[in-house]
Image (spheres, rainbow, N blue to C red):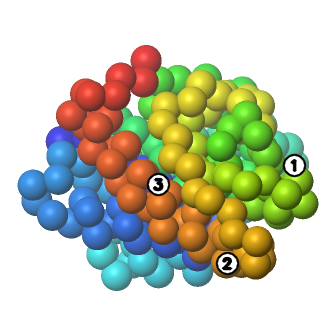
C-alpha cells in the first residue's frame, strides 16, 4: 500500500478525488496526511475523511529555507512513499525537493512546457490556444519544469472564460491524477 501525503493551497477538489478513490480498500494507495501553506478551504475534505492535516505558513518564518524545513519535517513525520502537490501554490526550495527526490509530483493545468506558472489557464486563453490540458510531472526546483509523467489535452472553446476552461481542465485533471497515483502504486509508473 502506497502512503501518500497531499499538499494543497486552495479548494482541494483534486484532493477530494484522491480521498474518494483511496477510500476504496481495493485502491493500492492511502492518504496519510494533508498539508497546506495556509488555512485552505480544501483541508475540510481531509477532516471529513478523518485524515491528519497540518498548516505551515511561510509568513511565520524568516526565510523560505526555514519554512521549507518545517514543511518537510511535517511531511516526513508521516513517512510517505509519495507526495502529491495538488494545487499547492508555492515554489519549493532545493532542501525540500532534494529530500523528496523520486517521491514528489505536481499537477498543472496546461500542456507543459506551455504556460508554466500560477496563471496557466489565463495564459492559454490570452495566447488564443485551441488546445490546452493537464500535465502531471516530477517536481524539481524550477517553476513547473520537472520531467513530464502524463498529459491529457482539453479543447478550448471560443466562448470559454478562465473559469469555464479551468473547470473543464479540472474534470480531466482529477481523473488523470487518481489514475497516475494508482499507476505509481502499481509500479506501472516508476518515478526514480
Ligand atoms: C488545479 O487546476 C491545479 O493544477 C492548479 O490549481 C488547481 C487546484 O484546484 N495548480 P483544486 O484546489 O484541486 O480544486
Q: Nearer the viewer, mark 3 or mark 1?
A: 3
Quadrant housing residue 77: top left
- Badge 2 density bin: few <14, some 14–19, many ≥20, Cα 10 Å: some
Q: Looking at the image, is mark 3 or mark 2 earlier in the sequence? A: 3
Q: Which residue is mark 1?
A: 62
| CA distance for labels 3 and 1 | 25 Å
Relative side of 95 to 102, left or right = right
Q: Secondary structure at mark 3?
A: strand
Q: Which residue is mark 3?
A: 6
Q: Check residue 164 in the rendering and tell me which mark sits there, or answer none.
A: 2
Relative side of 135 to 53, left or right = right
Q: Looking at the image, is mark 2 or mark 1 earlier in the sequence? A: 1
Q: Residue at x 39, y 59 (%)?
A: 175
**Residue furthest out toward the left:** 26
**Residue furthest out toward the top:** 192
- Badge 3 density bin: few <14, some 14–19, many ≥20, Cα 10 Å: many
Amino acid at each position: 500500500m502506497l502512503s501518500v501525503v497531499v499538499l494543497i493551497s486552495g479548494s482541494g477538489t483534486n484532493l477530494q478525488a484522491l480521498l474518494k478513490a483511496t477510500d476504496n480498500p481495493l485502491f493500492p494507495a492511502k492518504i496519510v496526511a494533508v498539508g497546506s501553506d495556509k488555512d485552505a478551504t480544501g483541508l475540510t475534505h481531509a477532516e471529513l475523511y478523518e485524515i491528519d492535516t497540518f498548516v505551515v505558513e511561510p509568513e511565520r518564518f524568516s526565510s523560505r529555507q526555514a519554512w521549507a524545513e518545517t514543511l518537510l519535517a511535517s511531511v516526513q513525520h508521516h513517512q510517505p512513499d509519495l507526495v502529491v502537490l495538488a494545487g499547492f501554490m508555492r515554489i519549493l526550495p532545493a532542501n525540500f525537493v532534494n529530500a523528496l527526490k523520486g517521491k514528489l509530483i505536481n499537477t498543472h493545468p496546461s500542456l507543459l512546457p506551455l504556460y508554466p506558472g500560477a496563471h496557466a489557464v489565463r495564459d492559454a486563453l490570452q495566447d488564443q490556444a485551441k488546445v490546452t490540458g493537464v500535465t502531471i510531472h516530477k517536481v524539481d526546483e524550477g517553476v513547473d519544469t520537472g520531467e513530464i509523467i502524463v498529459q491529457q489535452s482539453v479543447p478550448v472553446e471560443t466562448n470559454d472564460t478562465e473559469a469555464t476552461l479551468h473547470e473543464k481542465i479540472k474534470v480531466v485533471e482529477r481523473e488523470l491524477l487518481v489514475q497516475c497515483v494508482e499507476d505509481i502504486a502499481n509500479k506501472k509508473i516508476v518515478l526514480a
